[in-house]
Image (cartoon, rainbow, N blue to C red):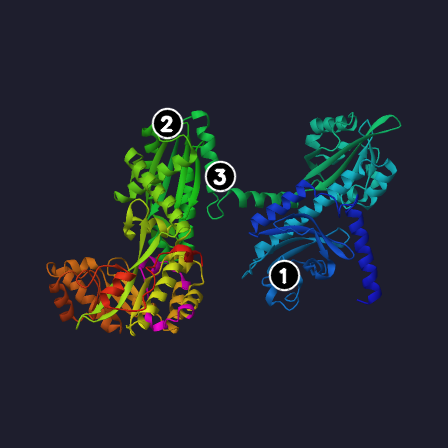
Amino acid sequence: MSDSLASLDEEARLRALAALAAHDWLNASPDPALAHIVELVARLLGAPAAFVSLVDKDRQVFHAKVGIGLCETTRDIAFCDRTIAQDGVLVVLDASRDPRFRDNPLVTGEPFIRFYAGAPLRTADGHAIGTLCLAGSEARTDFTEADRRTLSDLARLALDRLELRRLEVARCALQARFEHMAATSPDAIICADSCGQITVWSAAAERLFGYTVPEALDRPVALILPERMRGGNEGDLRRMASSDGSLSGRTVELIACHRNGDEFPIELSLSTWCEEGKPAFGAIVRDVRQRRVVEDRLFRLAHLDPLTELPNRAVLRGRIEAAISGGRAAAVLMIDLDGFKEINDAHGHSVGDAVLQTAARRLRITVSPDSIAARFGGDEFAVVLPGVGDPVAAVGTAEAAIAALSEPYDIEGLVLRVGASVGVALSPAHGAREEDLVICADAALYRAKADGRGRCRLFTPDMREAAQRDRACRDGLRRAVERGEFVLHYQPQVRLSDGALTGAEALIRWQHPELGLLAPAAFLTVLDEGPDAARIGDWVLRTACAQARAWRDGGLPSFRIGVNLCVAQFRRGDLVERVASVLTETGLPASALELEITETIILRNDPGVVTALRDLRRLDVGIAFDDYGTGYASLSLLKRFPLTRLKIDRSFVNGLCEDPRDAAVVRAVIELSRSFNLEVIAEGIETDEQRRRLLAKGCQEAQGYLFGRPMAAAAFAAHYGVGNCRADGRSGSRLGV
């Protein structure tokens, strides 16, 4: 495009902005509806900041915004200036790596934008007067096609709202000016006299309804309605036309009819005024078919689980609150599919998703029409039975659900079987609040699974005590994180042939202010399921590596440290980088670190786990499989995963001398380790006889009470005469590093 043409196009764009931003909207407070759209796009697309930017000649003005303090910037640094120059959505995943933006003051300084996505606000004439944008200070790895469509749809809603505001302001103008604006408006505008006869029929109305201006003028305004609806709604339209003005500013929705007979939804924004002493009526008319599609999609995103199309957890909580309001009786059923994880691991997520969809359909059919079935998360569902306070009736529904969910599943030619366990809680007997009922039903569900699965359990007070203990543990762990109450103890690992110290396993302890030193069995399950698991795991890794480096410098040059990993550290996706950073920070050689993983991590069926472990092995970090032989881990895992050591579980070592089956398992694990060229270490050695038998079978290393209990760092150093000892491994403020 030549400079002169570009200049003319920019002048037209600025005129469109001036027309749409009437009454100094560039400086006025934003429309509340527009602010709501901005909040909605930030929430739906997971961004800390969102805004509507109107791009003037030399500046951009943030007309509606959330999460950003700026009111305006110069146009030359505005990301939005590039957005309005293109048709589609502009996405910048990492501005610091994008040559167009990496030197931009908004990227290098405040507000430090790394991620940006913007959709142009383009008028019907094709002029981009601004943008609907997302921004964040953290880079992203992707912004999906679905995300782009959602942002574009919401941009259209934002532009509709700007246009509506413009036309609402215009209703105060004289009729002549109103008609002039009607001729240029992209929305249909219809005016009628007090008798309901059409007096103004805009060009957009011609396009929307198919009648020309001569065909529409002086005909009843009910012309826009389907024939079958003209009796009732025609009278309503006439009353609007003869109104005293009380309807002015209101918006209504109707079903309209095109000249060819096609029916479609419309929205009418109403205005009334007087002409020569007689009332007149006007309506801005919009085809809202596309908006209905967007609104329906947004409703489903906010209220329904996308996989099963059952109400989601947020809706469930609201339904429970409504069911028990005023002390009314209701039952809550928490349902978990038994054996679903094994199906998901064996056949993949697509088959697992099909099982969940089938289970949802069965559950919806099984419960009564006035009941609510919802997906609580994962393979867990919930049912609310309003008005049901009888335990027999509630348990009857639970047993019917178990029977329906336990029927075989025919998925892609596979006949699969899962079971179901159900926990039941009643209101007001077990609680008068939504949160209490969910906790009680969940506690009953855990009891049902612990009792053998495939059954229903009604909540009892002893379950409440267990639930309260879990809650107290969660609350205590939160305080422990804040106060730095975690410490590390170290259990020695020795060479069986001569008893020489080879390393230690770092074991977390909780120095509880009231209960004293707690072993992991008292809190680790709750910690692993909580939000701080990865953060604590990082602290354990850093503290243990620093201690190992100190002991290597203090007289144990070949000392190796074992550190347990948790699922949350893999789920975060940056484990390799964090381990490498800790090794660099502490100066510990990678070969002196052995990371221990459990079956819970290995059986997640996550390719990212294998990739992370292989990358760690390339760093020369050791990978040990803890508690091998106690679960479902197959031999193929020893080939697939880059392991360096197997750990024989203490349960087999305890029976080594008395139970031939335990001895056989120990012998098999040692033989497997040889076949796969893996090292092996046995846990839980307490007697010299166990030591001799393990040595005779070819076990190389061991740990257990025979060689030493887990000790604080100072005690460990004193026992082995190590100098340069660090602190005792309390978490303290370093937990937040």
Specify start and end residues of the magenta stretch as a single range: 584-608
Where residue 268 sits in the image (x, y, percent)?
Answer: 72, 36
Where residue 399 sits in the image (x, y, percent)?
Answer: 32, 36
Q: Residues within 10 Å of mark 1 (few under 14, many from 20)?
A: few
Which residue is at 75% across, 51% downward?
123
Which residue is at 81% across, 59% downward?
9
**Image check: 726 left or right of 223?**
left
Circle on res. 389: 2
Pick the residue in front: 108 or 220: 108
* Local secondary structure at mark 3: helix
Identify the mark nearer the N-term, 1 or 3: 1
Where residue 685 sits in the image (x, y, percent)?
Answer: 17, 62
Magenta region includes residue 451: no
Circle on res. 571: none
Q: Amino acid at mark 3?
A: Val
Q: Is residue 412 visible?
A: no
Residue 622, compared with residue 420, is above or below; it is below
Which residue is at 34% across, 29% downward?
393
Q: Amino acid at mark 1?
A: Gly
**Image check: 487 left or right of 275?**
left
Q: Residue 722 lies in what quarter of the image?
A: bottom left
* Local secondary structure at mark 1: loop
Residue at the disc numbered 3 = 315
Which residue is at 35% across, 36% downward?
440
Residue 249, compared with residue 107, is above or below; it is above
* Local secondary structure at mark 2: loop
Q: CA distance from mark 2 to mark 1?
A: 60 Å
The extreme right residue here reads 276
Residue at the disc numbered 1 = 109
